[in-house]
Image (cartoon, rainbow, N blue to C red):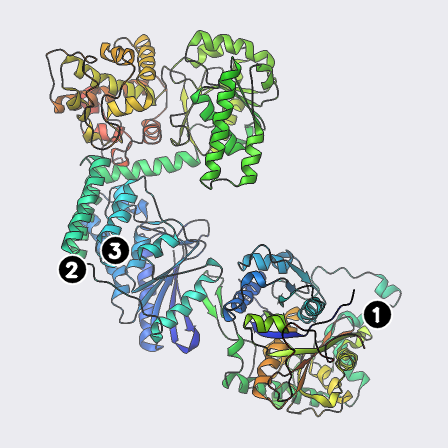
Amino acid sequence: MPTHVRLVDLPGGAGPLALLTLTSGDPRRPATLGAESLEAFDAAVTAAQGLVETAGVVAVAVTGANGVFCAGADLGAVASVHDRALSEELGRRGHAVLGRLGTLGVPTFAYVNGLALGGGLETALNCTYRTVSTGARGLGLPEAYLGLVPGWGGCYLLPRLIGPAAAVTVAIENALANNRSIDGPAALQLGIADAAFAPADFLVESLRWTAGVLRGDVVVPRPDHTGDAAAWDAAVARGRAVADARVHGAAPAPYRALELIAGARTASREEAFAAEDAALADLGVSDELHAGLYAFTLVQRAGKKPQGAPPAELARKVTSVGVVGAGLMASQLALLLLHRLRVPIVLTDVDDARVEKGVAFVRSGVDELLAKGRITSDTANRLRANVSGSTDKAALGLADFVIEAVFEDLAVKQQMLRELEPLLREDAVIATNTSSLSVSAMAGVLEHPERFVGFHFFNPVAVLPLVEVVRTPQTDEATLATAFALGRKLKKTCVLVSDAPAFVVNRVLTRMFDEVMRAVDEGTPLLEADRAVDPMGLPMSPLRLASLVGPAVMLHVHRTLAGAFPDRYRVSDNLERWVEAGSPDLVSRKGPVALTGAEQGVVQQGDAPSTAEEVLVRVQDALADEISRLLADGVVARPQEVDVCLVLGTGHPLFTGGITPYLDRTGASERATGRRFHEVGAF
Amino acid sequence: MTRTTRNVVFADGVRTPFGKARPDGLFADTRADDLVVACLRELLRRNPSLPPERVEEVAVAAATQTGDQGLVLGRSAALLAGLPVTTPGYAIDRWCAGAMTAVTTVAASIAVGALDVALAGGVEHMGHHPLGAGMDPNPRFLTERIVDPDALDMGKTAESLHDRFPALTKDRADAFAAASQQKFAAAVAAGQVAADLVPVAVRDAEGAWGLASADELARPQTTVEGLANLRTPFRPHGRVTAGNASPLTDGATACLLAAEDVAAELGLTTRMRMAGFGFAGVEPEVMGLGPIPSTEKALRHAGLGIEDIGLFELNEAFAVQVLSFLDHFGIADDDPRVNRYGGAIAIGHPLAASGVRLMTQLARQFSEHPEVRYGVTAMCVGLGQGGTVVWENPHHADFVPSPAGTASGSDTAGAR
């Protein structure tokens, strides 16, 4: 991973400039900063310094290539460090090398041509000035999301450059919002970049701007933000509130980053960099970081190469799709399929009113996409023209892929499938979006069960990126390959699971919810039971999630699982009463979790309350037990697939590693099953 | 319907640095279309009073129109340069006179009122597109003796000029070539070249970014003695050498043309006014003679004689070819009116791009020489053609701007 140095004559006779190009040496891979590439960068800076002394170089600049400035620290290198001294050295080395950009004796410039994440953006922050391409995307500090702090100067330099409020937005709020990044124009707006130029001649214009700065024609204002202690405190407090809402104090990284940002107002550069080193040293050996890197890598890989997927070339072409059922879930599926595949979609249901409602939902969804600028008006016309509905299932006769999302009742689905199959093409793939019924039992009524597959989305369909692809013993490779190819086109990550009650996500979540409800039934105060699992860092408390999914759906899944595994699952009376009462929200939908009062007269409790700690341990143990059974049943092959499912299907935070690293870390797996999911030090 | 013609002015012109067409050349790892884009964007930047949507045509020439010179260059470069989608564009080809033809073609459109403002230029990345690459000449050329076999080899056509005019000796060619190098070096030192160069960001084979901000082909140390013993690659004991011919070159040019009244309305500078143009054909095996009849034709259109011309920008494809022009018109080899900044022998000749370089240099010389009323840009073209544009100097005391919004005077381009 070389960093090249070239001497460039600045336009207008402003003098020679040493231009450093960060590359990975392989155009398909972004440049990152690891042990080796940091040394190469250091050597390039040394060469540039030599040119300052020998060739009269008046400024040093850094840029990247192929749409990438620098993707930041090499995560593989970070993941391989388990020793605190080594971890501290990685931080110190980054500071030492990047920090040279601030102490060369001549002005330094970063020309941020594209992606600049973490240490990449910090490379730019260590320079005196920055330009950004208006076409750049993927700028940000994702460290707190992964389990680190922006520790190569980011926590000190950024708030001093753009003020504490904007720094908290970039380093904490965006990072914890599932790693949101910003683009070039936003970086200019926030003050991260001093100037922005169009990509067509970004580098030349950056060099001309540089010449203007050096000549004094361009003056870059640098407001001092350190005087306003109140604003600084307020920004840090807001950052804490954001972190609390996301991780409830359960992950150390965002809090540590906020401490560093708080200290940056009064600390000297040296003090601040030393504090960043210490933070990196501590976090670099933390379980949360290593679980985070494990999950991050896992999810990236699962998106590109799903475990167990058959060869992609076996997939059948999907040029027309049928959706059986026109209810809310079916309509959401139809909209997603239409948006991503842009092929004709036919919805069917039992009466005209339902069909019309479903088609109207899809069309209004197209209008929304248009209003948000996600599609052009031509595409909107195309999509609207491609959706139609019918009460006659014969309208599905040309479809290559038919997915059913009718009422969740096995007999209803079986009857529908019996009617449907003779109407379809012989090679059409048939899929079900059932969340918990037996896919095999449905396949059993088909003439050709080998073309039947489960294709289980999560609500809201447009948002959650997971699909559980459910294989029955009869499902053939071409059918599976078609399902995986379709999932990829829908921009979802597919995880292959065997047919078993509630598959992975719902089986695990239901076990957790059931354990919480047991505690409630026994007499644990509702709010206390609901908050007891906060240390797991779930994006939503169990009762809030239940309201979002719908207590009636929860009840249905509980019944299925109680039927399948009566030794572990049951149907809580309180859950039944909740549904009977019309499923009122028991806790607030937004803001801090609070009771709504709707539990009065609905929730009936015993007199054996548990403490929050007891509830948490019970939930942890139940989850470890259930996941080890799920693995023993062969629903998925490895704990890794469970973790991918929980990160993508329910938004479990990275620092839990999904779930199994968390259960190992808290001792739950050994308590409940006598063994860990992963060996000690596996990641 | 009566139709009047309008005067056309050259408002600005730029070029990229010219690089060696070799794997170690400035632009070896840079796309040809990106060179054009750099020129178009620079013209827009240098003329901020021009609203981009007022550009109504982008004509870009290349002698080989495939690969990175292939996708309807004018239109694709316009889109890549960020011009509005409403700006049309096309690719054009007359080999070495490509950019010159782009200029005369859009000028004709402007003159008849079909459009107001246009960008015109050319590019040749001879490293990516060696002359003649992919060409498939019709075998009838040879079987029916339509052209001499030597006509498709430009160096051999230059040797043929020496044959035809024994007075054109190798010594004269070498002396002219050495002078070209010296004049160019002096122009560079005086800042007359850099003023119209567009710096281009380039990546080298290792992937490092750099900046191309100066030409790389010139050999300012050249002496007549040094040229005397160079190899003659086109013929044993020939006269044409790498030293008295233009080198293989990568580069691009572009200029801004407008109707004179529209230029005034938009606050553009009139740097030259077109007085006439002409193209003409000659025997392909002595294609270097092409500029003689084309210049006579253009002068006739302009109502001028050769004695009215105060500055010449002649493309130096070969020294002998320029000398044949000078001899024909009775101009001395070292006449100071000719190629004051040196020529293609020193600067380089990226085939279809060169025509606009001549114009850009003439425009700068006009501003330095208000005493000159008219100038000529001329060049030879392979397969036996010549092209000439005659220009009027707006800095001259007798220059009369055409009144805004009215038709032109009697000296416009047009048939007579």
Identified at 32% across, 8% down, the residue is A563
Q: Are marks 2 and 1 in contact (CB under 8 Å)?
A: no
Horizontally, residue B55 falls left or right of residue B154, namely: left
The residue at which mark 1 appears reads as: B147
Tell me if residue A443 comes above or below residue B387 in the rendering. above
- The amino acid type found where label 2 is placed reads Gly
Q: Chain of mark 1?
A: B
User: In what element is the residue under mark 2?
Assistant: loop
Q: Quadrant of residue B88?
A: bottom right
Tell me where residue A524 appears, x and y as whole percent. 13, 18
- Label placed on residue A158: 3
- The amino acid type found where label 3 is placed reads Leu
Mark 2 Cα-neighbour bin, 10 Å: few <14, some 14–19, many ≥20? few
Q: Chain of mark 2?
A: A
Tell me where residue B56 appears, x and y as whole percent. 62, 62
Distance from disc 3 to disc 2, alpha carbons, whole Å, reads 15 Å
- Asked whether A200 or A87 is in front, the reply is A200
Identified at 27% across, 34% down, the residue is A653
Distance from disc 2 to disc 1, alpha carbons, whole Å, reads 83 Å
Frontmost of labels 3 and 2 is: 2
Distance from disc 3 to disc 1, alpha carbons, whole Å, reads 71 Å
The residue at which mark 2 appears reads as: A227
